[in-house]
Amino acid sequence: MKKYNVAIAGATGAVGGAMLDVLARKNFPINELRLLASERSVGKKLTFQGKEITVQLLSKDAFTDIDIALFSAGATRSLDFAPAAAAAGAVVIDNSSAYRMDPEIPLVVPEVNPHAIAQYTKRGIIANPNCSTIQMLVALKPIHDKVKIKRIVVSTYQAVSGTGAPAIEELKAQVLAYAKGDPLKSEVYPHQIAFNCLPHIDSFLDNGYTKEEMKMVNETRKIFEDDSIGVTATTVRVPVVYGHSEAVNIETEQKITAAEVKELLSTAAGVTLVDDPANNQYPMAIDCAGSFETLVGRIREDESIANGINLWVVSDNILKGAALNAVQIAEHYIEKYL
Ligand code: NAP
Ligand code: 3JN
């Protein structure tokens, strides 16, 4: 089997660490693994499949002989270094929002639009969507193919790990302080996150929505290749460590029953149906942590309109929402294009 030289830009971060984990769990065919981060981490050692690898500086000349460069070092680093990696001959799979809406760059969820990967030749970069978009579209794609979705109304319940390690620490510290009756400190979020919900993810825009909400609108249209689909989102940060949950309401062109949706999703790629309310079985964030699957349940007809369905969709935001989706893109790329 052919093996590939892979670089991870942002290897010391939360998503970078999950990339190492996913590459190992999938036994990805790696020849050399090059780990890149900021000056702060140069010389640090990370372990991959029992071997220590020394972290090197993310720089424009760090990509010689690399076949695949996985980027998760933030949008600014992607803008600064991804073109150099592509020019050096690597295909870049970028986890940031830097290139997602660039018309020359494919935005890919392998279960949804793997054909778009072919467009990588234009710039040598493939974009990974936002975590909240990915899990929603994994669940909706089979329904969209069958009865065409006209409109999506989604509310998210997003885990603090989406903000990175300091946010996880802030939640834990606030829970401990609350239990002791001590004052709670908020540094990462503008308000207390413990025992609270913040309808505020990323910054606010002039239209009153947040950037996170508009990512869900615009990325859905690009991935479904349908600018007519109506999408409206409310994204909320909740005191959960891993796993984003979403209440998704859809209106379809043709009628589909809840039973038909369950049947469709029972065989859908990347989906596990967890829908047995009589036995208290439904998707929960605590059950998705570490899983490669998107869990879907609470499937029922929206009785307020002719053709409507409600679903509850849960997935590990760091895995399918970021690292796993990127590695799956890499798998498709080597299988079809390298
Ligand atoms: P994180 O834990 O803070 O890690 C950031 C990584 O970027 C670290 O490896 C860090 O290296 C590196 N980095 C930061 N500044 C750098 C610089 N100037 N030069 C080189 N490397 C630098 O963040 P994370 O949670 O892993 O998220 C990283 C990025 O992934 C986010 O900014 C976002 O763009 C993307 N992301 C996407 C999704 C999604 O929805 N698909 C979800 C989460 C995150 P040091 O350790 O040396 O500082
Ligand atoms: O907040 C979350 O749950 C997901 C966070 C995603 C994120 C965090 C920092 C920067 C992104 C993203 O992927 O959209 C970015 C970014 O690259 O803009």
Image (cartoon, helix red, strand yellow):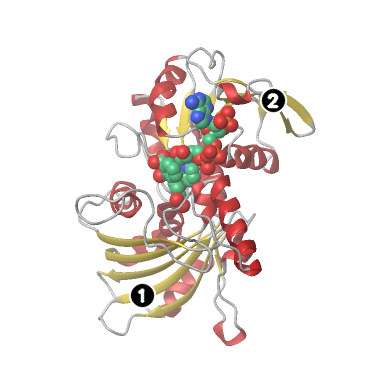
Q: Position of residue 199 (x, y in %)?
A: 37, 62
Q: Which residue is mark 2?
A: 44
Q: CA distance from mark 1 to mark 2?
A: 50 Å
Please name the amino acid that badge 2 sits on: Lys
Check the image and name the residue furthest to the front.
182
Q: Position of residue 124 (x, y in %)?
A: 40, 25
Label 2 secondary element:
loop
For the residue pair 64 and 238, the one nearer the viewer reads as 238
Mark 1 vs mark 2: which is more N-terminal?
A: 2
Please name the amino acid that badge 1 sits on: Ile
Q: Position of residue 105 (x, y in %)?
A: 34, 33
Give the left or right position of residue 19, taking residue 190 as reference.
Answer: right
* In the image, residue 27 above or below residue 269: above
**Mark 1 close to ligand 2, CB under 8 Å:** no
For the residue pair 268 and 227, the one nearer the viewer reads as 227
| Contact check, label 1 and label 2, Cβ < 8 Å | no
Mark drawn on residue 139: none
Q: Quadrant of ligand 2?
A: top left
For the residue pair 112 and 281, the one nearer the viewer reads as 281
For the residue pair 28 and 245, the one nearer the viewer reads as 245
Mark drawn on residue 309: 1
Q: Residues within 10 Å of mark 1 (few under 14, many from 20)?
A: many
Say whether residue 88 is visible. Answer: yes
In the picture, residue 278 is in which quadrant? bottom right
Check the image and name the residue furthest to the bottom.
278
